[in-house]
Image (cartoon, rainbow, N blue to C red):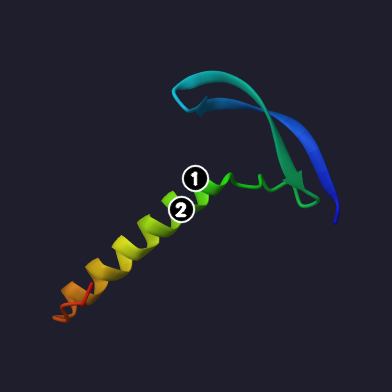
Amino acid sequence: MSLCLGIWEGTRENRTGYWLRWWDEAGELLLWGSELVARERQRVEQLIAQLRAAGIEPEL
């Protein structure tokens, strides 16, 4: 597994600044767990909206 450690500027836990983050060999930022959860939640909400637009009410 080829990983690189780099500096990322952004906000985390209400603190803005520079953070050490992991990047893969393709230059893609590896997400923190909370970022993965937020991304999946957004994906689920989009899928629910698509189902409703098609007249299907999903069971949650």
- Asked if 17 appears above or below 29 in the picture, the reply is above
Residue 34 locus on image (x, y percent): 49, 45
Would residue 43 appear left or right of 56 to someone viewing this image?
right
Q: Do the residues labelled 2 and 1 touch (CB within 8 Å)?
A: yes
Residue pictured at 76% horizontal, 52% vertical: 26
Looking at the rendered structure, the kind of residue marked 1 is Ser
In this view, the residue farthest toward the right is: 2
Residue 49 locus on image (x, y percent): 23, 67
Q: Mark 1 points at which residue?
A: 34
Q: Name the residue under label 2.
A: 37
Disc 2 residue crowd, few under 14, some 14–19, many 20+, Cα 10 Å: few
The residues tagged by marks 2 and 1 sit, at their Cα atoms, a distance apart of 5 Å
Residue pictured at 23% horizontal, 72% vertical: 60
Quarter of the figure with the N terminus: bottom right
Residue placed most toward the observer, 19 or 54: 19
Residue 42 locus on image (x, y percent): 36, 56
For the image shown, how many numbered marks are present on the structure? 2
Looking at the rendered structure, the kind of residue marked 2 is Val
Residue pictured at 39% horizontal, 62% vertical: 43
Residue 11 locus on image (x, y percent): 50, 26
Q: Identify the disc placed on residue 4.
A: none
